[in-house]
Image: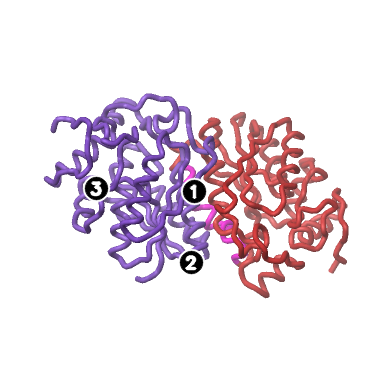
Chain colours: A purple, B red
Protein backbone atom coordinates (compact mmCIF):
# COMPACT_ATOMS: atom_id res chain seq x y z
CA UNK A 1 0.00 0.00 0.00
CA UNK A 2 2.09 2.91 1.26
CA UNK A 3 -0.61 5.58 1.02
CA UNK A 4 -2.12 7.48 3.89
CA UNK A 5 -5.15 6.39 5.90
CA UNK A 6 -7.31 8.47 8.21
CA UNK A 7 -8.43 6.37 11.19
CA UNK A 8 -11.44 7.38 13.28
CA UNK A 9 -10.05 6.75 16.74
CA UNK A 10 -12.22 6.83 19.84
CA UNK A 11 -9.68 5.27 22.17
CA UNK A 12 -11.70 2.07 22.53
CA UNK A 13 -11.01 -1.52 21.49
CA UNK A 14 -12.62 -1.39 18.03
CA UNK A 15 -10.94 1.73 16.68
CA UNK A 16 -7.61 0.69 18.20
CA UNK A 17 -7.92 -2.62 16.36
CA UNK A 18 -8.56 -0.61 13.17
CA UNK A 19 -5.33 1.32 13.81
CA UNK A 20 -3.46 -1.97 14.15
CA UNK A 21 -4.96 -3.30 10.91
CA UNK A 22 -4.27 -0.11 8.93
CA UNK A 23 -0.72 -0.15 10.26
CA UNK A 24 -0.29 -3.82 9.32
CA UNK A 25 -1.50 -2.96 5.81
CA UNK A 26 1.33 -0.44 5.48
CA UNK A 27 -0.63 2.79 5.59
CA UNK A 28 0.82 6.00 6.94
CA UNK A 29 -1.67 6.64 9.76
CA UNK A 30 -3.62 9.85 10.30
CA UNK A 31 -5.72 9.29 13.45
CA UNK A 32 -8.54 11.70 14.25
CA UNK A 33 -10.85 11.99 17.27
CA UNK A 34 -14.04 13.99 17.26
CA UNK A 35 -15.57 15.33 20.44
CA UNK A 36 -19.33 15.70 20.06
CA UNK A 37 -20.58 16.16 23.62
CA UNK A 38 -19.74 12.80 25.19
CA UNK A 39 -20.04 12.88 28.94
CA UNK A 40 -16.34 12.43 29.45
CA UNK A 41 -13.20 13.48 27.62
CA UNK A 42 -11.21 10.55 28.97
CA UNK A 43 -11.68 8.67 25.71
CA UNK A 44 -9.89 11.38 23.74
CA UNK A 45 -6.98 11.14 26.12
CA UNK A 46 -6.93 7.35 25.56
CA UNK A 47 -7.01 7.93 21.79
CA UNK A 48 -4.04 10.27 22.11
CA UNK A 49 -2.09 7.50 23.85
CA UNK A 50 -2.93 4.96 21.16
CA UNK A 51 -1.92 7.43 18.43
CA UNK A 52 1.43 8.05 20.14
CA UNK A 53 2.03 4.30 20.36
CA UNK A 54 1.95 4.34 16.54
CA UNK A 55 4.20 7.42 16.40
CA UNK A 56 1.38 9.77 15.43
CA UNK A 57 -0.07 12.97 16.80
CA UNK A 58 -3.82 12.75 17.16
CA UNK A 59 -5.86 15.33 15.29
CA UNK A 60 -8.81 16.40 17.45
CA UNK A 61 -11.96 18.22 16.43
CA UNK A 62 -14.49 19.68 18.86
CA UNK A 63 -17.99 20.04 17.47
CA UNK A 64 -20.48 22.50 18.96
CA UNK A 65 -21.89 20.66 22.01
CA UNK A 66 -25.55 20.76 20.91
CA UNK A 67 -24.88 19.53 17.37
CA UNK A 68 -25.26 15.79 17.92
CA UNK A 69 -25.77 15.52 21.65
CA UNK A 70 -29.21 14.21 22.39
CA UNK A 71 -30.98 14.61 25.74
CA UNK A 72 -32.42 11.14 25.09
CA UNK A 73 -29.04 9.46 24.87
CA UNK A 74 -27.24 8.01 27.87
CA UNK A 75 -23.95 8.86 26.12
CA UNK A 76 -24.47 12.59 25.93
CA UNK A 77 -27.60 13.48 27.88
CA UNK A 78 -29.22 13.01 31.27
CA UNK A 79 -30.51 9.50 30.75
CA UNK A 80 -29.18 6.96 33.20
CA UNK A 81 -26.47 4.64 31.91
CA UNK A 82 -27.93 1.15 31.85
CA UNK A 83 -26.15 -1.76 33.53
CA UNK A 84 -26.80 -4.44 30.96
CA UNK A 85 -25.41 -5.99 27.81
CA UNK A 86 -26.35 -4.69 24.38
CA UNK A 87 -28.38 -7.79 23.64
CA UNK A 88 -30.37 -7.49 26.85
CA UNK A 89 -31.04 -3.85 25.99
CA UNK A 90 -32.18 -4.77 22.51
CA UNK A 91 -34.56 -7.41 23.74
CA UNK A 92 -36.04 -5.15 26.38
CA UNK A 93 -36.13 -1.68 24.88
CA UNK A 94 -35.51 -1.55 21.12
CA UNK A 95 -32.93 1.06 20.11
CA UNK A 96 -30.02 1.35 22.50
CA UNK A 97 -30.23 4.21 25.00
CA UNK A 98 -26.64 4.98 24.04
CA UNK A 99 -27.54 5.88 20.44
CA UNK A 100 -26.49 9.37 19.33
CA UNK A 101 -28.67 9.96 16.28
CA UNK A 102 -26.80 9.82 12.98
CA UNK A 103 -23.51 10.32 14.73
CA UNK A 104 -21.43 8.13 12.46
CA UNK A 105 -22.39 9.90 9.24
CA UNK A 106 -21.12 13.14 10.71
CA UNK A 107 -17.90 11.55 11.97
CA UNK A 108 -17.31 9.84 8.61
CA UNK A 109 -17.95 13.06 6.68
CA UNK A 110 -15.44 14.99 8.78
CA UNK A 111 -12.91 12.16 8.50
CA UNK A 112 -13.35 12.13 4.71
CA UNK A 113 -12.88 15.91 4.41
CA UNK A 114 -9.67 15.44 6.41
CA UNK A 115 -8.61 12.56 4.15
CA UNK A 116 -9.07 14.75 1.06
CA UNK A 117 -7.08 17.56 2.68
CA UNK A 118 -4.27 15.13 3.55
CA UNK A 119 -4.27 13.28 0.24
CA UNK A 120 -5.20 10.06 2.05
CA UNK A 121 -6.75 7.20 0.11
CA UNK A 122 -8.67 5.50 2.91
CA UNK A 123 -10.83 6.20 5.93
CA UNK A 124 -10.89 3.42 8.54
CA UNK A 125 -14.00 3.04 10.67
CA UNK A 126 -14.35 0.38 13.38
CA UNK A 127 -18.01 -0.63 13.36
CA UNK A 128 -18.37 -4.36 14.08
CA UNK A 129 -21.14 -6.87 13.53
CA UNK A 130 -22.65 -6.74 17.01
CA UNK A 131 -23.01 -2.94 16.84
CA UNK A 132 -25.60 -3.49 14.14
CA UNK A 133 -27.40 -6.30 16.00
CA UNK A 134 -31.16 -5.88 15.80
CA UNK A 135 -30.78 -2.25 14.61
CA UNK A 136 -29.25 -1.12 17.90
CA UNK A 137 -27.02 1.25 15.97
CA UNK A 138 -28.41 1.63 12.45
CA UNK A 139 -25.41 3.79 11.53
CA UNK A 140 -23.17 0.74 12.04
CA UNK A 141 -25.19 -1.54 9.75
CA UNK A 142 -23.82 -2.98 6.51
CA UNK A 143 -26.56 -1.12 4.63
CA UNK A 144 -25.47 2.20 6.12
CA UNK A 145 -21.78 1.43 5.59
CA UNK A 146 -22.37 0.49 1.96
CA UNK A 147 -24.25 3.73 1.31
CA UNK A 148 -21.59 5.85 3.00
CA UNK A 149 -18.82 4.00 1.14
CA UNK A 150 -20.48 5.04 -2.12
CA UNK A 151 -21.02 8.63 -0.99
CA UNK A 152 -17.38 8.87 0.11
CA UNK A 153 -16.03 7.37 -3.10
CA UNK A 154 -18.15 9.51 -5.42
CA UNK A 155 -17.90 12.67 -3.32
CA UNK A 156 -14.10 12.52 -3.13
CA UNK A 157 -13.62 12.34 -6.92
CA UNK A 158 -13.02 8.61 -6.38
CA UNK A 159 -9.87 9.31 -4.35
CA UNK A 160 -11.01 7.97 -0.97
CA UNK A 161 -12.43 4.60 0.03
CA UNK A 162 -14.15 3.63 3.25
CA UNK A 163 -12.48 0.66 4.97
CA UNK A 164 -14.45 -1.23 7.64
CA UNK A 165 -12.42 -4.37 8.33
CA UNK A 166 -14.44 -5.23 11.47
CA UNK A 167 -17.81 -5.04 9.71
CA UNK A 168 -18.45 -8.79 9.84
CA UNK A 169 -16.61 -9.65 13.05
CA UNK A 170 -18.07 -10.25 16.50
CA UNK A 171 -16.46 -8.40 19.39
CA UNK A 172 -14.58 -11.54 20.37
CA UNK A 173 -13.21 -11.84 16.82
CA UNK A 174 -12.21 -8.16 16.87
CA UNK A 175 -10.19 -8.75 20.04
CA UNK A 176 -8.62 -11.91 18.58
CA UNK A 177 -7.46 -9.96 15.52
CA UNK A 178 -6.11 -7.12 17.66
CA UNK A 179 -4.23 -9.52 19.94
CA UNK A 180 -2.60 -11.11 16.87
CA UNK A 181 -1.43 -7.67 15.76
CA UNK A 182 -0.27 -6.50 19.20
CA UNK A 183 -2.87 -3.73 19.46
CA UNK A 184 -2.10 -1.60 22.54
CA UNK A 185 -5.25 -2.52 24.46
CA UNK A 186 -3.63 -1.53 27.75
CA UNK A 187 -3.99 2.11 26.62
CA UNK A 188 -7.66 1.89 25.62
CA UNK A 189 -10.74 3.08 27.45
CA UNK A 190 -14.15 1.60 26.67
CA UNK A 191 -16.24 2.36 29.77
CA UNK A 192 -19.27 4.45 28.86
CA UNK A 193 -19.01 6.14 32.23
CA UNK A 194 -15.45 7.20 31.39
CA UNK A 195 -14.07 5.69 34.59
CA UNK A 196 -10.56 4.42 35.33
CA UNK A 197 -10.61 1.78 36.71
CA UNK A 198 -13.49 0.96 34.37
CA UNK A 199 -16.90 0.49 36.00
CA UNK A 200 -17.29 -3.10 34.77
CA UNK A 201 -21.07 -3.04 34.44
CA UNK A 202 -22.01 -0.61 31.64
CA UNK A 203 -22.82 -2.26 28.27
CA UNK A 204 -19.36 -1.73 26.74
CA UNK A 205 -17.48 -2.86 29.85
CA UNK A 206 -19.55 -6.07 29.92
CA UNK A 207 -19.15 -6.64 26.17
CA UNK A 208 -15.41 -6.04 26.36
CA UNK A 209 -14.86 -8.36 29.33
CA UNK A 210 -16.77 -11.14 27.58
CA UNK A 211 -14.71 -10.64 24.40
CA UNK A 212 -11.43 -11.08 26.27
CA UNK A 213 -12.83 -14.09 28.16
CA UNK A 214 -13.84 -15.70 24.88
CA UNK A 215 -10.20 -15.42 23.82
CA UNK A 216 -9.02 -16.74 27.19
CA UNK A 217 -6.85 -13.67 27.64
CA UNK A 218 -6.90 -11.24 30.58
CA UNK A 219 -8.11 -7.78 29.70
CA UNK A 220 -5.06 -5.58 30.49
CA UNK A 221 -7.04 -2.62 31.91
CA UNK A 222 -8.25 -2.33 35.49
CA UNK A 223 -11.87 -2.74 36.56
CA UNK A 224 -13.64 -1.62 39.72
CA UNK A 225 -16.04 -4.55 39.33
CA UNK A 226 -16.15 -7.57 37.07
CA UNK A 227 -19.43 -9.20 36.17
CA UNK A 228 -19.51 -12.92 36.91
CA UNK A 229 -19.00 -15.13 33.88
CA UNK A 230 -22.46 -16.24 32.72
CA UNK B 1 -48.16 15.84 4.18
CA UNK B 2 -48.22 17.87 7.36
CA UNK B 3 -44.97 16.55 8.79
CA UNK B 4 -41.84 18.55 9.48
CA UNK B 5 -39.01 19.13 7.02
CA UNK B 6 -35.50 20.36 7.72
CA UNK B 7 -34.31 22.60 4.87
CA UNK B 8 -30.61 23.29 4.33
CA UNK B 9 -30.75 27.01 3.67
CA UNK B 10 -27.76 28.96 2.40
CA UNK B 11 -29.65 32.11 1.52
CA UNK B 12 -29.12 31.60 -2.22
CA UNK B 13 -31.54 30.90 -5.06
CA UNK B 14 -31.44 27.08 -4.95
CA UNK B 15 -32.08 26.56 -1.25
CA UNK B 16 -34.70 29.32 -1.22
CA UNK B 17 -36.48 27.48 -4.04
CA UNK B 18 -36.32 24.33 -1.90
CA UNK B 19 -37.98 26.24 0.95
CA UNK B 20 -40.76 27.31 -1.42
CA UNK B 21 -41.26 23.73 -2.64
CA UNK B 22 -41.27 22.22 0.87
CA UNK B 23 -43.75 24.92 1.92
CA UNK B 24 -45.97 24.20 -1.11
CA UNK B 25 -45.91 20.51 -0.16
CA UNK B 26 -47.35 21.39 3.26
CA UNK B 27 -44.36 20.68 5.45
CA UNK B 28 -43.76 22.53 8.69
CA UNK B 29 -40.39 24.09 7.86
CA UNK B 30 -37.24 23.80 9.98
CA UNK B 31 -34.55 25.81 8.14
CA UNK B 32 -30.91 25.39 9.17
CA UNK B 33 -27.74 27.20 8.06
CA UNK B 34 -24.28 25.89 8.72
CA UNK B 35 -21.27 28.16 8.86
CA UNK B 36 -18.13 26.29 7.86
CA UNK B 37 -15.58 29.01 7.20
CA UNK B 38 -17.05 30.78 4.18
CA UNK B 39 -15.37 34.09 3.50
CA UNK B 40 -18.47 36.07 4.38
CA UNK B 41 -21.35 35.70 6.81
CA UNK B 42 -23.68 37.73 4.62
CA UNK B 43 -25.26 34.54 3.28
CA UNK B 44 -26.39 33.48 6.74
CA UNK B 45 -28.02 36.87 7.19
CA UNK B 46 -29.81 36.34 3.85
CA UNK B 47 -30.92 32.88 5.00
CA UNK B 48 -32.32 34.39 8.17
CA UNK B 49 -34.42 36.79 6.06
CA UNK B 50 -35.76 33.95 3.89
CA UNK B 51 -36.64 31.89 6.98
CA UNK B 52 -38.51 34.83 8.50
CA UNK B 53 -40.46 35.26 5.26
CA UNK B 54 -41.81 31.75 5.93
CA UNK B 55 -42.48 32.56 9.59
CA UNK B 56 -39.52 30.52 10.86
CA UNK B 57 -36.50 31.19 13.01
CA UNK B 58 -33.33 29.99 11.36
CA UNK B 59 -31.27 27.45 13.28
CA UNK B 60 -27.58 28.23 12.80
CA UNK B 61 -24.59 26.01 13.49
CA UNK B 62 -20.99 27.19 13.48
CA UNK B 63 -18.44 24.49 12.75
CA UNK B 64 -14.80 24.85 13.83
CA UNK B 65 -13.23 27.04 11.12
CA UNK B 66 -10.58 24.55 10.03
CA UNK B 67 -12.94 21.58 9.77
CA UNK B 68 -13.95 21.89 6.12
CA UNK B 69 -12.26 25.10 5.06
CA UNK B 70 -9.64 24.34 2.47
CA UNK B 71 -6.77 26.67 1.60
CA UNK B 72 -7.21 25.46 -1.97
CA UNK B 73 -10.80 26.65 -2.24
CA UNK B 74 -11.78 30.12 -3.40
CA UNK B 75 -14.82 29.87 -1.12
CA UNK B 76 -12.96 29.51 2.15
CA UNK B 77 -9.26 30.00 1.47
CA UNK B 78 -6.83 32.41 -0.11
CA UNK B 79 -7.37 31.38 -3.70
CA UNK B 80 -8.59 34.17 -5.95
CA UNK B 81 -12.28 34.09 -6.85
CA UNK B 82 -12.48 33.39 -10.58
CA UNK B 83 -14.50 35.65 -12.89
CA UNK B 84 -16.01 33.01 -15.12
CA UNK B 85 -18.96 30.69 -15.47
CA UNK B 86 -18.95 27.20 -14.05
CA UNK B 87 -18.79 25.67 -17.49
CA UNK B 88 -15.80 27.76 -18.50
CA UNK B 89 -14.08 26.72 -15.29
CA UNK B 90 -14.82 23.07 -15.95
CA UNK B 91 -13.45 23.22 -19.46
CA UNK B 92 -10.31 25.03 -18.39
CA UNK B 93 -9.38 23.64 -14.98
CA UNK B 94 -11.24 20.47 -14.01
CA UNK B 95 -12.73 20.65 -10.52
CA UNK B 96 -14.16 24.03 -9.60
CA UNK B 97 -11.90 26.25 -7.48
CA UNK B 98 -14.94 26.86 -5.30
CA UNK B 99 -15.15 23.23 -4.20
CA UNK B 100 -15.02 22.67 -0.45
CA UNK B 101 -14.08 19.00 -0.20
CA UNK B 102 -16.93 16.75 0.93
CA UNK B 103 -18.83 19.72 2.31
CA UNK B 104 -22.28 18.46 1.46
CA UNK B 105 -21.97 15.13 3.28
CA UNK B 106 -21.16 17.02 6.46
CA UNK B 107 -24.02 19.47 5.97
CA UNK B 108 -26.46 16.64 5.21
CA UNK B 109 -25.33 14.64 8.24
CA UNK B 110 -25.84 17.59 10.57
CA UNK B 111 -29.22 18.35 8.98
CA UNK B 112 -30.27 14.72 9.43
CA UNK B 113 -29.23 14.67 13.10
CA UNK B 114 -31.36 17.81 13.51
CA UNK B 115 -34.27 16.15 11.68
CA UNK B 116 -34.14 13.16 14.04
CA UNK B 117 -34.04 15.46 17.06
CA UNK B 118 -37.06 17.40 15.71
CA UNK B 119 -39.04 14.37 14.61
CA UNK B 120 -38.91 15.62 11.00
CA UNK B 121 -39.52 13.20 8.16
CA UNK B 122 -37.55 14.96 5.42
CA UNK B 123 -34.34 16.83 4.74
CA UNK B 124 -34.46 19.17 1.73
CA UNK B 125 -31.23 19.84 -0.15
CA UNK B 126 -31.03 22.16 -3.17
CA UNK B 127 -28.38 20.64 -5.44
CA UNK B 128 -29.33 21.11 -9.09
CA UNK B 129 -28.25 19.46 -12.32
CA UNK B 130 -25.64 22.02 -13.35
CA UNK B 131 -23.85 21.74 -9.98
CA UNK B 132 -22.94 18.22 -10.97
CA UNK B 133 -21.88 19.18 -14.52
CA UNK B 134 -18.65 17.47 -15.47
CA UNK B 135 -17.94 16.54 -11.83
CA UNK B 136 -17.53 20.17 -10.78
CA UNK B 137 -19.13 19.33 -7.46
CA UNK B 138 -19.14 15.56 -7.05
CA UNK B 139 -21.10 15.97 -3.82
CA UNK B 140 -24.01 17.33 -5.85
CA UNK B 141 -24.12 14.41 -8.30
CA UNK B 142 -27.05 11.99 -8.54
CA UNK B 143 -24.70 9.17 -7.54
CA UNK B 144 -23.71 11.00 -4.35
CA UNK B 145 -27.29 12.02 -3.61
CA UNK B 146 -28.52 8.46 -4.05
CA UNK B 147 -25.88 7.11 -1.70
CA UNK B 148 -26.60 9.75 0.95
CA UNK B 149 -30.35 9.18 0.61
CA UNK B 150 -29.77 5.53 1.49
CA UNK B 151 -27.43 6.37 4.37
CA UNK B 152 -29.95 8.85 5.76
CA UNK B 153 -32.88 6.46 5.44
CA UNK B 154 -31.11 3.50 7.00
CA UNK B 155 -29.25 5.56 9.61
CA UNK B 156 -32.42 7.26 10.86
CA UNK B 157 -34.29 3.99 11.51
CA UNK B 158 -36.12 4.71 8.23
CA UNK B 159 -37.70 7.85 9.70
CA UNK B 160 -36.04 10.47 7.47
CA UNK B 161 -35.87 10.77 3.69
CA UNK B 162 -33.63 13.00 1.62
CA UNK B 163 -35.59 15.25 -0.78
CA UNK B 164 -33.74 16.85 -3.68
CA UNK B 165 -36.45 18.33 -5.91
CA UNK B 166 -33.94 20.34 -8.00
CA UNK B 167 -31.72 17.36 -8.75
CA UNK B 168 -32.66 17.18 -12.44
CA UNK B 169 -33.34 20.87 -13.10
CA UNK B 170 -31.08 23.41 -14.78
CA UNK B 171 -30.58 26.71 -12.97
CA UNK B 172 -33.07 28.37 -15.34
CA UNK B 173 -35.65 25.69 -14.50
CA UNK B 174 -34.97 26.17 -10.78
CA UNK B 175 -35.72 29.87 -11.12
CA UNK B 176 -38.85 29.18 -13.15
CA UNK B 177 -40.16 26.86 -10.43
CA UNK B 178 -39.35 29.39 -7.71
CA UNK B 179 -41.05 32.23 -9.58
CA UNK B 180 -44.19 30.09 -9.90
CA UNK B 181 -44.18 29.57 -6.15
CA UNK B 182 -43.39 33.18 -5.24
CA UNK B 183 -39.99 32.38 -3.72
CA UNK B 184 -38.61 35.52 -2.02
CA UNK B 185 -35.64 35.96 -4.36
CA UNK B 186 -35.35 39.64 -3.40
CA UNK B 187 -34.00 38.47 -0.03
CA UNK B 188 -31.40 36.06 -1.40
CA UNK B 189 -27.67 36.47 -1.78
CA UNK B 190 -25.71 34.36 -4.24
CA UNK B 191 -22.52 36.32 -4.85
CA UNK B 192 -19.46 34.25 -3.90
CA UNK B 193 -17.74 37.47 -2.85
CA UNK B 194 -20.60 38.15 -0.43
CA UNK B 195 -21.18 41.64 -1.85
CA UNK B 196 -24.36 43.72 -1.86
CA UNK B 197 -24.86 44.95 -4.52
CA UNK B 198 -23.66 41.62 -5.93
CA UNK B 199 -20.39 41.68 -7.89
CA UNK B 200 -21.98 40.40 -11.09
CA UNK B 201 -18.93 38.54 -12.37
CA UNK B 202 -18.21 35.61 -10.03
CA UNK B 203 -19.48 32.20 -11.24
CA UNK B 204 -22.71 32.25 -9.23
CA UNK B 205 -23.58 35.84 -10.11
CA UNK B 206 -23.14 35.04 -13.81
CA UNK B 207 -25.10 31.79 -13.55
CA UNK B 208 -27.90 33.49 -11.65
CA UNK B 209 -28.20 36.42 -14.07
CA UNK B 210 -28.41 34.02 -17.01
CA UNK B 211 -31.10 31.97 -15.26
CA UNK B 212 -33.31 35.02 -14.77
CA UNK B 213 -32.66 36.15 -18.34
CA UNK B 214 -33.69 32.74 -19.64
CA UNK B 215 -37.02 33.27 -17.87
CA UNK B 216 -37.28 36.84 -19.22
CA UNK B 217 -37.66 38.15 -15.69
CA UNK B 218 -35.54 40.81 -13.99
CA UNK B 219 -33.44 39.54 -11.11
CA UNK B 220 -34.79 41.52 -8.12
CA UNK B 221 -31.43 42.01 -6.39
CA UNK B 222 -28.94 44.78 -7.19
CA UNK B 223 -25.70 44.26 -9.07
CA UNK B 224 -22.58 46.41 -9.25
CA UNK B 225 -21.89 45.04 -12.74
CA UNK B 226 -23.85 42.92 -15.15
CA UNK B 227 -22.08 40.73 -17.67
CA UNK B 228 -23.27 41.32 -21.24
CA UNK B 229 -25.72 38.73 -22.54
CA UNK B 230 -23.73 36.24 -24.62
Q: In the rendered image, which residue does mark 1 sit on?
A: A61
Name the secondary structure under disc 1: strand
Q: CA distance from mark 3 to mark 1?
A: 24 Å
Mark 2 or 1: the one toward you:
1
Name the secondary structure under disc 2: loop
> Looking at the image, which is closer to me, A154 or A53?
A53
Q: Quadrant of the N terminus of chain A?
A: bottom left
- In the shown orientation, is residue A203 left or right of residue B198? left
Residue B169, image x, y percentages? 68, 55
Task: Give the chain of mark 1.
Answer: A
- In the shown orientation, is residue A159 left or right of residue B128? left
- Which picture quadrant has residue A83? top left
On whether disc 2 and disc 1 are found on a single subunit, the reply is: yes
How many numbered discs, if any?
A: 3
Residue under the image location 65 percent in, 57 percent down: B76
Residue under the image location 27 percent in, 31 percent down: A199
Residue under the image location 52 percent in, 58 percent down: B143
Task: Give the chain of mark 2.
Answer: A
Q: How busy is the neighbourhood of tag 1: few (under 14 within 10 Å), some, or many (20 plus)?
A: some
Residue closest to the far left: A216
Q: CA distance from mark 2 to mark 3?
A: 31 Å
On whether disc 2 and disc 3 are found on a single subunit, the reply is: yes
On whether disc 3 and disc 1 are found on a single subunit, the reply is: yes
- Which picture quadrant has residue A31? bottom left
**Residue numbers of the magenta segment:** B135-154
Q: In the rendered image, which residue does mark 2 sit on?
A: A119
Q: Tell me, yes or no, whether the highlighted magenta stretch contains residue B148.
A: yes
Of pointers 2 and 1, the one earlier in the residue sequence? 1
Q: In the rendered image, which residue does mark 3 sit on?
A: A186
* Callouts 3 and 1 close, C-beta under 8 Å: no
Task: Give the chain of mark 3.
Answer: A
Amino acid sequence: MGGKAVVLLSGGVDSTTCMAIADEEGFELRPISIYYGQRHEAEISAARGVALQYGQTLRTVALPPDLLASPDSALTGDREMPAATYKELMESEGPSPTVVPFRNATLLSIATAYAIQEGAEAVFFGAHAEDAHNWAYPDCSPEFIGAMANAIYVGSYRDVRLCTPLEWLTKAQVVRRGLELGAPYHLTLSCYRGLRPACGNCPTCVERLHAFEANEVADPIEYAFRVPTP
